[in-house]
Image: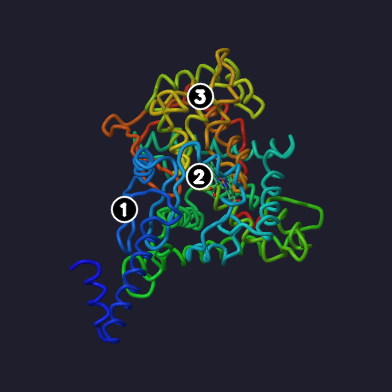
Amino acid sequence: MGMQGMVEHFIRLSPRNILLVALTLLAAYHLWLLMQKWLNTGNLPGPFPWPIIGNAPQLGSTPHLFFTRMAQKYGNIFQIKLGSRTVVVLNGDTIKEALVKKGVDFAGRPDFTSFKFVSNGKSMAFGDYNKWWRVHRRVAHSTVRAFSAGKIETKKAFENHAISEIEELLRVFLKKTAEEGYFVPHQYLVISTANIMSAVCFGGRYTYDDKEFQQVVGRNDKFTRTVGAGSMVDVMPWLQYFPNPIKTLFEQFRELNSEFHDFIMGKVIEHRKTIEPGIIRDMTDACIQALDKGISGSVGVELGKDYVSPTISDIFGASQDTLSTSLQWITLILMRYPEIQKRLQDEVAQVVHRTQLPTIEDQARLPYVMAFIYENTVVFVNQWSSNHDPDKWTQPEVFDPLRFLDKNGALDKDRTSSVLIFSVGKRRCIGEDLSRMHLFLFTAAMVHQCEFKPDPSCPLTMDCDYGLSLKPRLYRMAVSLRDNLDLLNSVGLPQADQPAENN
Ligand code: HEM
């Protein structure tokens, strides 16, 4: 039938049939629009998303590698679908470009259901970018600075906490080696990190076997696993309306948040009982004194008392997984590359006498230690692609701290500023200076004092598990002293206590 025939045929149709054809065409048009939207939101290329689940199953256990493969196929900016959400994935240099040049556009947070349960929706780290967030970030940042890199005295106070705790950790390592030969260090690295942060946040530390503290620390671990794996409920909200394993996991996540909230609240309440005007013992005191009188931002924006606990939760919470994961990588790498461990030991031996422990001031004279840290602390998934970009780094897959040293052996500032560790832009990490101090003191003191050896019966692997950060698999190690315990015994560790009670 030619065109004219089709028109004649159409004219002969009854009004009811014409209506039916029109409705069918309309429905087809809508379906087509829907498919276009589904396949190509924002016109970015990307892999084909399955209905309902999107690309979620393709991410697998190593999403950063999936993203890298997709970037090779679709370019550095592409999109995927997670459930019903369209997610734009930035890779390589586009991360910095977006976060710096379009800082405000990329400073927001998605309105994920799970985020509403973090600090009862008052978290700064999980909160969306707005006028309140700006004031909140200012308060949190100045609190961290006041207890870390703010002034020389605050640096020293932090150094004392860190060094005492590193020494205690070393003692635990030696004890475990004596008892078990080779042992799994992960939980001790987690507790040691939590203790340093507990000292600066709440004014005290815990013993390694303290049950309450082990619970707090264990909860943190579970938290990052649930939130980091991108709670399925966030992208498929309908999963919470009928019984299924994801719903159970999500309920556990809510409970963890409420327990963590109670723990921090308890500390704040204890502090309020003993706080004295003008005396700031720790970060909790600093937050109480700042927020109780109210902190204003732009017109009509004021944060008060009820932001003390969320601010401390953000600081304490955000420091745990990040720092302890970095320490786990550091010890793993020391053992995997014994020649690097030896070179670190030699550099520290030239600068720090055997009768002293390394201090923050030694940092400038230990460029190889710093280069080792830059090469190491690459833990965040979205930053992985930038730090493994072959256009930017020679042999990015090779572990080589020397890439951060210039030809005179000094730390190359251009190179170190190119590596993405603490992110950039509006959401850049507020714990960067504190973390650098911690990682430096840990690495320098450990290589100064001891030697790490892997368990020959379980080979070391660089395989990792995916959470908020990439975590090394469990490994076993033995630790031996390079000379004796005299130096460690001469430095006192503050008594373990229940922090708030002791204030
Ligand atoms: C090696 C250790 C650490 C690494 C690698 C790290 C990395 C990061 C990264 C990449 C971000 C940006 C996340 C985003 O894109 O939204 C971030 C944010 C944040 N970090 Fe860290 N961090 C570390 C340690 C710390 C410590 C010790 C603290 C607290 C003292 C801290 C507090 C925060 C907070 C509160 C945020 C949220 C900032 C905001 O949303 O504006 N971090 N961190």
Sequence-wise, which precedes: disc 3 or disc 1?
1
**Gap in angstroms between the C-alphas marked 2 and 3:** 31 Å
Residue that badge 1 annotates? 48
291 with respect to 332 (left or right): right
Camera-nearest label, 1 or 2? 1
Which residue occupies 48% across, 63% down?
112
330 and 84: which is toward the camera? 84
Which kind of residue does numbered mark 3 sit on?
A: Asn
Q: In terms of secondary structure, where does tag 1 sit?
A: loop
**Gap in angstroms between the C-alphas marked 1 and 2:** 33 Å
186 and 237: which is toward the camera? 237
Which kind of residue does numbered mark 2 sit on?
A: Thr
Q: Do the residues labelled 1 and 2 touch (CB within 8 Å)?
A: no
Residue that badge 3 annotates? 484
The image shows residue 425 at horizontal and vertical percentages of 61, 44
Which residue occupies 46% across, 54% down?
42
Which kind of residue does numbered mark 1 sit on?
A: Phe
115 and 462: which is toward the camera? 115
Camera-nearest label, 2 or 3? 2
Residue that badge 2 annotates? 322
The image shows residue 338 at horizontal and vertical percentages of 39, 22
Residue 474 visible, this orientation: no
Task: Tell me the quarter of the image containing the N terminus.
Answer: bottom left
